[in-house]
Image: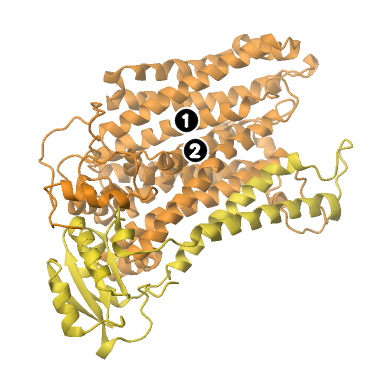
Chain colours: A orange, B yellow
Amino acid sequence: MSSVAVVEIDNTIDDPTRPTPLVLGGNDFTSVTEKISGIAEKPRPPRAWYVAFGVASFLTAVLFAMLAYLILTGVGVWGVNIPVGWGWAIVNFVFWVGIGHAGTLISAILFLLRQKWRTSINRFAEAMTIFAVICAGIFPAVHVGRIWVVHWLFPLPNYQTVWPNFRSPLLWDVFAVGTYMLVSLMFWYTGMIPDLATLRDRATSRLRAIIYGFFALGWRASHRHWHRYEKAYLLLAGLATPLVLSVHSVVSFDFATSQLPGWHTTIFPPYFVAGAIFSGFAMVGTLLVPARRWFGLKDIVTLYHLENMNKIILATGSMVGYAYVTEFFMAWYSGNPDEAFTFYNRALGPYAWAYWIMVTCNVVVPQFFWSKKLRTNTAVMMIIYVLVNVGMWFERFVITVTSLSRDFLPSSWDYYKPTLVDGLTFAGSFGLFFTLFLLFIRYLPMVAMAEVKTVMPAAVIEGEHRPVGDYHGDIPQTHDLHPVMHDHPEHRGDHL
Amino acid sequence: MSATDVRATGAGQGGLYGLLVEFDDPVALVEACREVRDAGFRRWDAHSPFPIHGMDDAMGIRGTRLPFLVLAGGVIGCGLALLMQWWMNAVSYPYLISGKPLFGLPANIPVTFELTILVSALTTFFAMWTLNGLPRLHHPLFRSRRFRRATSDRFFIVVEAADPQFDAEQTRRFLEGLGGTAVEAVEE
């Protein structure tokens, strides 16, 4: 096996004549396995893990305490009332579902677009998707008020012999988010089977061998299996791609199909999807930057990977900014006085502070990523990621609350304020998210080892200069295998 | 399932499952696979920690029918979703809302779309397992210590004893000539 000489390579320099090296530090197949499996095999994680886990599990306990209080008392413990009947519950729901979108974008859309750099970060991002969707699912489930009849959301026979109304966007949401959760889970698990088999084969104790062996399903890296596996993976990516675009579109229908000024607009589906990807990438970054440092993954999750993510954040952040401008333009151009008032009220009314936090964090802050120096600096990235997350939460707050608090009838206007229970529940949902995430990086392979190996030079049998694009068997390349192998003196054998 | 699939069914000759030959890089594996294929073996397989380009051709693997199963799953999901919405909202419990039709396609598209995706994805997920004969928690190959590196950094070819052309001596000599680093017999 040839291995790359250990030299400091700056892979953020774009050279279109050569494929960018995606794994640095002179790693070979063995060291990739050692590094990534080693994290899940260490008897003890780093101290930072324990501290983070302590804080996260405490917050999770706070979440469950708040939910118990809510269920035992009633939704009156939240700040919601007429006219603002949709408060933080819906804000948090949209926020968390949006976060999840980056995971599917990285795992499915970038796969179809043959972006090889996704292999180092896709496992991580997909895990984030699943945990974010779990957090999202809590809010609509508890905000129904009577959680003991939450099964009425599903088309199940019940004693009233009433079926759900399939013309309601809230019901579409149940199907969209439910499908999204299941498909993300299947995609994540399918991708993980080969790596679980690696952990099984390296297991030093019987217990580990049994547990990882059970979940690895008896995978033995057979090529007859790889053949169907790759086809299945491609199909799942093809199915997840329209799905992820549909999920936030359906979420936006909750607003867009109503008649409230500021909500009733056709720009919502694309605007929500762009915002979702924007916020999701920021969250992936927030988790990835510390994790690659703590677990020594800088050779595998390189600066090039982070830089690419930052470029996507810049692009989607600018799309979101464009959507904000379009909304204002349409409010003026439509000539609808209610619509115009809503936007005047957003920017200059009682919630102007929230609106300007949103604009600053989502539109102004990502513009720093135009500078290469800033977008390759991990400290700057972290600050921007956190601010983007703040900004995207405020976007949902602004959309939900400003339109409701001042609608058509001035006599019913009110200023919505959340309660402490609202705040603690939201903080608790972060606890749950991080608890699940920390367990994931402790016990599961957090980088897709089998996939990373396919983008290493030693795995490329057709020769060094083959095009970057095609990979993973999605385009048959076998016909040109013979001539390329012949021309290349490095390869052994006279014929192939 | 094709006849060339590795799933061992009966015992081989004298408790032998097959012969395993190890390589330490993917180029050598692909090269050797072509020779095994051309030698006319049927029940054999290559194992590598990641999928390798060009292996389908080198091994002579034909396309899988998985995509057709998924298409069928999608059609069933789509049909069931429409049927469910029509029956529940227009027949079993008719909703009269603002004089709108009891069954109007536009309003039923989101749920139809989601269930089409869901049933297709479930089909992909479970059909891949089934076609590959998974889950299968034990396999003779797991007895080999050497084979454990098949999921990490080594490359293997396994010729089963159940292959009609298999001959313990001759096949061993053939495999030793492939340029691998070791040949090992795997017990059933």
Give amino acid for label 1: Ser
Per the model, the C-alpha gap separating discs 1 and 2 is 8 Å
The spot of residue A328 in percent (x, y) is 62, 12
Q: Residue at x 36, y 17 (%)?
A: A368
Rendered view: A106 above or below B33: above
Residue A253 spot, x, y in % from top left: 67, 33
Looking at the picture, tell me which residue is in the foreground, A483 or B175: A483
Horizontal placement of B4 versus B13: left or right?
right
Q: Chain of mark 2?
A: A
* Residue at 17% in and 82% down: B170
Of B34 and A153, the residue lying toward us: B34
Q: Residues within 10 Å of mark 2 (few under 14, many from 20)?
A: many
* Image x and y of residue A450, in percent: 30, 53
* Residue A163 located left or right of residue A442: right
* Residue marked by disc 1: A279
Of residues A456 and A82, the one nearer the viewer is: A456
